[in-house]
Image (cartoon, helix red, strand yellow):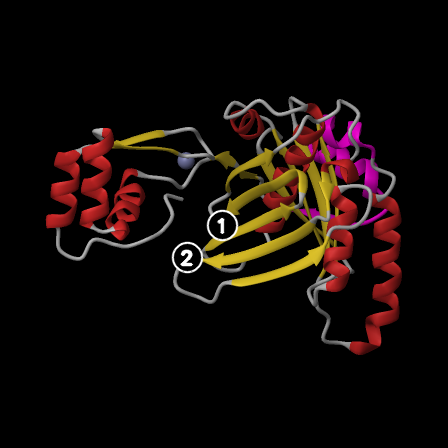
Amino acid sequence: MSDKSQRFLIDNTHIRGELVQLDEAWQALQATATYPAPIRKVLGEALAAISLLATTLKFKGSLILQINASAPVHMLVVQATSENTVRGLARWNAEIADDASYNDLFQEGRIIITVEPSDGGERYQSIVALSGESLADSLKSYFEQSEQLQTRLWLASNDQKAAGLLLQRLPNSDDSLVEEDNESWNRTLALSDTISAEELLTLDAETLLHRLYHEEDVRVFAQEAVTFKCQCSQEKVEAMIHSLGIKEARDIIEKQGSIEIDCEFCNTHYAVNHLDIERLFNQQSAPSTNSIH
Ligand SMILES: [Zn+2]
């Protein structure tokens, strides 16, 4: 199930699940920068996590998971869209020891999840302090603290693959079933806690679901492909330059000959010359944005 996500439901409960294993998408992300092994591990887990969480989006748009910290990894960000495309990066400002732990990487860390509808809906963001010994731990307390559906994730990554499992407890309108639902939720969590990183990374979806939930009735849905794809474009670069104003754009061209921009997510190089600038500012109503992404 390479680069695929697999949705499932556990029948007779209000629990939905999702499995993801990323191979090419994860390797495409790694090709954009050379990451120290401890950062690479968290970045892979984060990529799996955002792929899983994006499957819960009910509208067109994207979901961004970001960890900000004072040092040494000051930013790690991953993004997934409702079209199942993913991208991400991490930035650090000090040497990273080979045996650096999760907590060594993020001092005074915060975890930020942003929901960004693409059709003009309201942007939603929530921030909690980073806690726990792993990204899955941090996300567990994130979901406990934010008023959202009960959600748990199991994550793993190595230099070849990134994988994860998500369980989510769906809302229940019938209060009389709550106790039974608590039992099935706790039982399913306990079963899921027996998964190893090795199994998440190597077993196919069918084997994995059987291994975990063979005593339950699991209903599986069609698998969906996940791909690495950046959202940068020449249009977005030009719109950003347009927002600088013609005077500043011409000043840069005069000093440097052209305006050169590299996308930090995918390393695509954009160059805009003086002819582009004149065309750009002669267009009526060019879109304005401060971001090339
Ligand atoms: Zn890009």
Pick the quarter of the image with the C terminus.
Answer: top left
Please state which of the two labelled residues, at mark 1 or mark 2, is closer to the viewer: 2
At x 27%, y 43%, the residue is 235
Q: As drawn, is 31 to the left or to the right of 206?
A: left
At x 87%, y 39%, the residue is 194
Secondary structure state at the residue bearing disc 1: loop
Disc 2 crowd rating (10 Å Cα; few below 14, some 14-19, many 20+) is some
**Region rendered in magenta:** 196-221
Indicate the position of residue 224 as horizontal and vertical percent values: 54, 40
| Amino acid marked by disc 1 | Ser
Q: Which residue is the site of mark 2?
A: 118
Pick the quarter of the image with the N terminus.
Answer: top right
Q: In which quarter of the image is residue 232?
A: top left
Alpha carbons under labels 1 and 2: distance apart: 10 Å
Q: Are marks 1 and 2 in contact (CB under 8 Å)?
A: yes
Indicate the position of residue 83 as horizontal and vertical percent values: 46, 46
Q: Which residue is the site of mark 1?
A: 82
Indicate the position of residue 184 as horizontal and vertical percent values: 85, 58
Q: As drawn, is 60 to the left or to the right of 55?
A: left
Disc 1 crowd rating (10 Å Cα; few below 14, some 14-19, many 20+) is some
User: Closer to the camera, 149 or 174?
Assistant: 149
User: Closer to the camera, 250 or 160?
Assistant: 250
| Amino acid marked by disc 2 | Ser
Q: Quadrant of ligand 1?
A: top left
